[in-house]
Amino acid sequence: MVVKELFANLAILSSMIFFYVQSTKDSPLNTKSSLSRKLFVGASGGILSNILMQYGIQVHTTIIDLRHIPVILMALFGGAIPALVALVLVIVGRLLIGVNSAACAAIASITLITLAAIYFSKRNVKNKTKIWSVLTLSNLFFS
């Protein structure tokens, strides 16, 4: 079952990223995009994260999902505004599922990952280094 649920999460994530890239070929998101574009893309990333939460992977008593990937992408390619918009929507979506200690831990971890992604997005290093740094840090948080 875990492989099936992981495949569903990966399929949703990759198809939505593909759809986004195809629909914005002419003007992809970057740090110089307009505020309205950043807000729209941030909201789209937050909705995608909420969809990924609904298809979480059940491993014993823990639920794992890929909700942090869209938020990381928002931070790395769009900067702080779309990442924070996506973060707020993820927090609201998680609180709608239920308010408990797991929700508090999930909110703390996604907030830390978002802040780390925003921090690394502002650094003056190669994109590859930024991506690997954020992914490594998020893996450490979730471990």
Image (tube, rainbow, N blue to C red):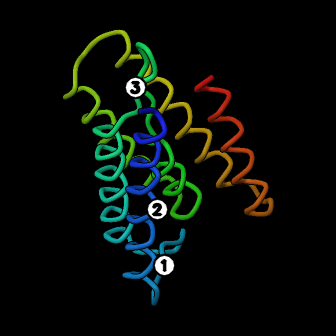
The number of numbered badges drawn on the structure is 3
At label 2, the amino acid type is Ser
Specify the quadrant of the image occupied by residue 137.
top right
Crowd class of label 2 (few under 14; some 14 to 19; many from 20; radius 10 Å): few
Specify the quadrant of the image occupied by residue 127.
bottom right
Mark earlier in primary sequence (3, 2): 2
Q: CA distance from mark 3 to mark 1?
A: 34 Å
Which mark, residue 14?
2
At label 3, the amino acid type is Gln
133, 17: nearer the viewer: 17
Can I make out residue 18 in this image?
yes
**x and y percent of residue 133 in the render?**
74, 45
Relative side of 74 to 58, left or right = right
* Residue projecting furthest to the left: 96
Mark earlier in primary sequence (3, 1): 1
Q: Residue at x 48, y 39 (%)?
A: 3
At label 1, the amino acid type is Pro
Q: CA distance from mark 3 to mark 2?
A: 20 Å
Q: Are marks 2 and 1 in contact (CB under 8 Å)?
A: no
Q: Which residue is mark 3?
A: 58
**x and y percent of residue 67 in the render?**
42, 42
Query: Quadrant location of the C terminus?
Result: top right
In front: label 3 or label 1? 3
Q: Secondary structure at mark 2?
A: helix
Q: Secondary structure at mark 1?
A: loop
Which mark, residue 28?
1
Picture layout, residue 34 above or below residue 50: below
**x and y percent of residue 84 in the render?**
41, 46
Relative side of 29 to 139, left or right = left
Picture layout, residue 99 above or below residue 78: above
Q: Residue at x 24, y 16 (%)?
A: 99
Q: Are marks 3 and 2 in contact (CB under 8 Å)?
A: no
